[in-house]
Image (spheres, grey):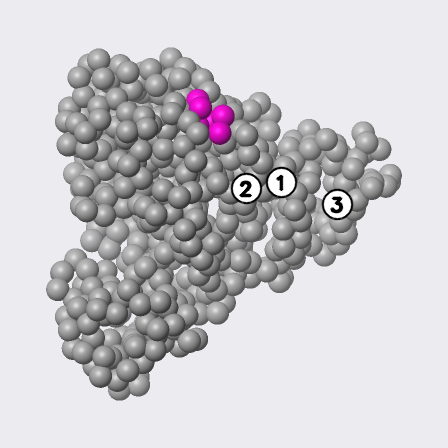
């Protein structure tokens, strides 16, 4: 079979995605598949010398929000430049299909608020060459990508499509409306969707404060949809919930998952207000599995951190009146104004009025310089508060000055979730639990102040190589978590491991050189919209369906990625 290869990767150390120890071998690739693994004696038209490098499966990102970007671009950054070769769209119940023409504005405003994608970007960028969910899938299918993409049916558009303005008012759906949403869900799954997603999070709202239409959805509606998923026999359910009443909410979700007969995944995070709730939820997950209901916590290997900076969408002085007076200025003019000592004094003297925003924006003990290379497990002595004490400064003044560094491009990090203990011990326990999956990178969302689509690279760099504030994790374990485990959870058993016959989605990595760069702001979205992009060094090649799409972080021009419809057999 190797004689049919059009690409051979020679002499690499294979970390094959199964969790087995690394071993040295060649890989022969042809027709988008792995033809053979071992000592390959034949030659191929193209070869990659991987001696001294590690070779892994392509990474599978189960939590992205490229629903809009995938309709206007073929390059899904930052995920694709961080080793991701398959990405799942349609998380958290938000998306753009189905959608009647007269209800597009509702979904645009919702995505703007929930996922920080400006209305002007969406209005200019979305082609709206669909109305039904199958038509949306066809629109995705018509475009080539730098990775494979898959999609889920999303609950908020279903409610808006079926109920109109009543959905925004959180009206209770009639039995007929529930049945129609269930029918549309089944239609989406039949068109190749890999699941259904919904949000029960109070933080998900439009910019004018209206909550996501799915907040507080009655159990009967979700059970009706769940039974349609059971009848279809494919897909999973993805949920985000606050778990403010954890006993009641988890029991409700378990009943819905049981009704679906399919796996359910939910966002599992350590909250500052309830730092031990994640442990309780994992205990409940274990009990659900024992009862025959497969539920999985979806976790991320680093804190969910807000990036602060004067170029970014959030920072500690954002809501102060004197800052708001210059917020409209172009960036260079704004930075020049912020260097004025009189304006600086006024901004520092003003309080952040909203108590919740003070906790979010002005908790100096929880704000750190991001660093270069970025440090996602900073010690307490590196906080703005601790550094201010050491320098004899007011922490707000120090924070202000730090953000003016690098000509105003400096970035600070405020870990909001997963850092209540000041280290990543809780995350390590989540990552190593048998009933969790790696996700929550949110690629394509929160583009002005979060940049977590690079979390796959961070898993390798921090957990398998560099961690100093606690035990690390074996490289083969980390690779398995971000490739095979995620692929199989989605029903994509044709990828995620390096084995004969599998899809040739592969990363060739210089592990010793692998490093994340600082996120940088780019102004390349429609209408000149801005987004943070985080590149990495050390990816010698990222290969999709047997074709290199990136070499040393630079695009090759090839776009072999396509829409994935439905589960795939091994």
Please tell me which residue is depicted at 32% across the width and 28% down the height of the picture: 101
Can the viewer see residue 85 in this picture? no
Q: Position of residue 511 (x, y in %)?
A: 62, 57
- Which of the two labelled residues, at mark 3 and mark 1, occupies the earlier sequence position? 3
* Element under disc 3: strand
- Which of the two labelled residues, at mark 2 and mark 1, occupies the earlier sequence position? 2
Please tell me which residue is depicted at 12% across the width and 64% down the height of the picture: 353
Please tell me which residue is depicted at 38% across the width and 23% down the height of the picture: 132
Disc assigned to residue 28: none
**Quarter of the rendering occupied by the C terminus:** top right
Q: Are marks 3 and 2 in contact (CB under 8 Å)?
A: no
Disc assigned to residue 559: 1
Give the Cα separation between the discs numbered 3 and 2. 26 Å
State whether residue 322 is above or below residue 446: below
Q: Tell me the magenta residue range.
A: 134-139
Can the viewer see residue 524 in this picture? yes
Left/right of residue 541 with respect to residue 473 in the rendered view: right
| Residue 341 lies in the magenta stretch | no
Number of numbered discs on residues? 3
Residue reaching furthest to the right? 42
Q: Nearer the viewer, residue 554 or 437?
A: 554
State whether residue 246 is above or below residue 332: above
Please tell me which residue is depicted at 34% across the width and 78% down the height of the picture: 336
């Amino acid at each position: 079979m190797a004689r049919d290869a059009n690409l051979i990767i020679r002499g690499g150390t294979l970390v094959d995605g199964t969790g087995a120890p690394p071993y040295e071998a060649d890989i022969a690739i042809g027709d988008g598949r792995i033809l053979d693994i071992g000592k390959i004696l034949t030659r191929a038209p193209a070869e990659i010398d991987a001696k001294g490098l590690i070779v892994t499966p392509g990474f599978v990102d189960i939590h992205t929000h490229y629903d809009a970007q995938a309709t206007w671009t073929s390059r899904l950054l930052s995920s694709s430049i961080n080793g991701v070769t398959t990405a799942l769209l349609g998380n958290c119940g938000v998306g753009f299909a189905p959608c009647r023409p007269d209800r597009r504005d509702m979904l645009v405003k919702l995505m703007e608020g929930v996922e920080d994608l400006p209305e002007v970007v969406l209005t200019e960028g979305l082609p709206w060459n669909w109305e039904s969910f199958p038509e949306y899938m066809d629109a995705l299918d018509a475009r080539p990508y730098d990775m494979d993409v898959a999609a889920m049916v999303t609950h908020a558009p279903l409610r808006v499509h079926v109920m109109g303005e009543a959905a925004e008012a959180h009206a209770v759906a009639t039995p007929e409306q529930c049945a129609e949403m269930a029918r549309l869900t089944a239609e989406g799954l039949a068109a190749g969707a890999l699941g259904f997603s919904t949000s029960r999070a109070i933080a998900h709202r439009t910019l004018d404060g209206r909550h996501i239409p799915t907040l507080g959805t009655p159990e009967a509606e979700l059970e009706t949809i769940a039974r349609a998923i059971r009848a279809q026999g494919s897909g999973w359910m993805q949920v985000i919930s606050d778990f403010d009443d954890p006993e009641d909410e988890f029991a409700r979700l378990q009943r819905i998952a049981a009704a679906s007969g399919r796996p359910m995944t939910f966002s599992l995070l350590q909250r500052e207000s309830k730092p031990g709730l994640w442990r309780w939820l994992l205990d409940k997950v274990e009990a659900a599995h024992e009862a025959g209901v497969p539920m999985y916590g979806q976790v991320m290997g680093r804190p969910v951190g807000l990036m602060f900076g004067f170029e970014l969408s959030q920072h500690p002085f954002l809501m102060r009146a004197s800052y708001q007076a210059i917020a409209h200025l172009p960036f260079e003019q704004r930075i020049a104004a912020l260097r004025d000592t009189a304006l600086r004094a006024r901004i520092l003297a003003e309080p952040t009025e909203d108590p919740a925003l003070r906790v979010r924006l002005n908790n100096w003990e929880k704000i750190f310089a991001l660093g270069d290379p970025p440090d996602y497990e900073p010690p307490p002595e590196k906080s703005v508060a601790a550094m201010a004490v050491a320098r004899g400064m007011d922490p707000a003044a120090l924070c202000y000055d730090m953000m003016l560094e690098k000509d105003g491009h400096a970035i600070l990090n405020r870990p909001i979730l997963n850092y209540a203990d000041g280290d990543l011990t809780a995350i390590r326990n989540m990552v190593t639990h048998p009933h969790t999956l790696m996700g929550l990178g949110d690629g394509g969302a929160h583009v002005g102040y979060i940049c977590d689509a690079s979390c796959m690279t961070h898993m390798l760099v921090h957990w398998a190589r560099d961690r100093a504030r606690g035990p690390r994790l074996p490289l083969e374990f980390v690779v398995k978590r971000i490739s095979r485990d995620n692929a199989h959870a989605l029903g994509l058993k044709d990828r995620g491991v390096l084995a004969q016959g599998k899809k040739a989605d592969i990363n060739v990595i210089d592990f010793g050189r692998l490093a994340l760069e600082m996120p940088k702001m780019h102004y390349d979205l429609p209408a000149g919209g801005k987004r943070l992009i985080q590149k990495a060094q050390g990816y010698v090649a990222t290969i999709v369906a047997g074709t290199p799409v990136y070499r040393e972080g630079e695009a090759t021009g090839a776009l072999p990625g396509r829409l994935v419809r439905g589960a795939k057999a091994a």
